[in-house]
Image (cartoon, rainbow, N blue to C red):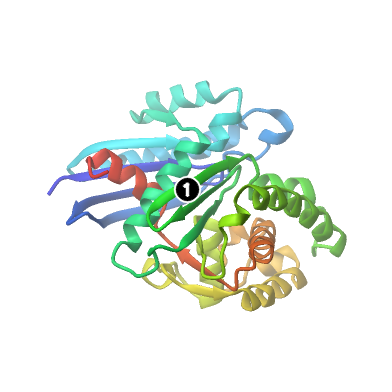
Amino acid sequence: MPLFASIDIGSNTLRLLIGNIKDKRIEHVFSDRKITRLADGIKETGRLKDKNIEASIAVLKEFSSIISGYEVKRVRAVATSALREAYNSDIFIEKVFTDTGISTEVISGEKEAEFILKGVLSSFSDFSLFTSHFSLIIDIGGGSTEWILCRGTHPVDMGSIPIGVIKLNRSFIKTDPVSEADIAELNRELISFLDRLKIRIGQHIEKDTHFIGTGGTFTTLASIDLGLETYSRERIHLHRIPLSRLQDISKKLLALPLRERKNLKGLEPERADLIIPGIQFTINTMKCFKFDELTVSDYGLLEGVLLEISGDK
């Protein structure tokens, strides 16, 4: 059975998935992820920092070596917000190809949303979640946020905005422990965006609309809620978190200085600062659309890319 590999060169995290397709379902053979914060500093300077370029290329070299150990039929590497925005992204792409042999494709926010939807749907196909009801799927990334509204398995509307947890953290989180003033300012920014989104799609949000989160922010929230010592795809995928419990987690996080958050079970130390804007974004979304519960999907962009290159669209 042929193997395929997808790589996500994200603003915060670089991820690799090697898998095959059996009966229209993805079988994960190998996966890995490393946080390099490629987008850190872009908002201020417009460019990728040299140290972040070096760290990311080191990870991609590792990924290339891993891929060469499998009989992979096709590899596709996609880059998102960081390379969409940085003026020196061409230099990075050229260096990646020279050093690793990996060709990098910078995709639009809309294409990213399409891949996310395809990946999420692939994991829910045998579940009753996707019926005739509406679902709102969101991926809060490091540099951008993608959202997809679908009815059953059919997309109704989707979009991408250049707001992510790295940018929000740099713009609004100025104190440690985080002050009420910082959170108030952050929430004003988030509510402003969510109010505009509500005008666009609010008429489709019903009492039985499902709220699905995919990507690092949401899988981290699931990991914290479950108190995981190590990452577990099986336990995180389809984990449900009520709004009330997210609010409790938020209070706990805000009460801790950064150094103590880094030791919190279920929270990777590298995400200890970014989880603050991430959980505030999540809670404000749920309040805006009156969602009582979040369902976490561990499937998303990587799986969507893998399905496309396998020809199983």
Q: Nearer the viewer, residue 54 or 257?
A: 257
Q: Nearer the viewer, residue 211 or 79?
A: 211
Q: Position of residue 45 (x, y in %)?
A: 71, 29
As shown in the figure, which amino acid type bears the numbered disc 1?
Val
Q: Position of residue 165 (x, y in %)?
A: 65, 50
Quadrant position of residue 25: bottom left
Above or below for 284 versus 140: below
Residue extending furthest toward the left: 1
Residue at 60% over, 73% down: 292
Residue at 41% over, 52% down: 300
Residue at 67% over, 68% down: 261
Residue at 64% over, 28% down: 47
Crowd around label 1: few <14 · some 14–19 · many ≥20 (10 Å): some
Quadrant position of residue 6: top left
The quadrant the C terminus occupies is top left
Left or right placement of residue 161 versus residue 134 in this view: right
Q: Nearer the viewer, residue 290 or 120?
A: 290
Q: How many numbered discs sit on the rendered protein?
A: 1
Q: Position of residue 312 (x, y in %)?
A: 23, 45
Residue extending furthest toward the right: 181
Residue beneath disc 1: 156
Left or right placement of residue 32 versus residue 199 in this view: left
Q: Is residue 99 visible?
A: yes
Q: Position of residue 230 (x, y in %)?
A: 45, 70
Q: Secondary structure at mark 1?
A: strand
Q: Is residue 16 visible?
A: no
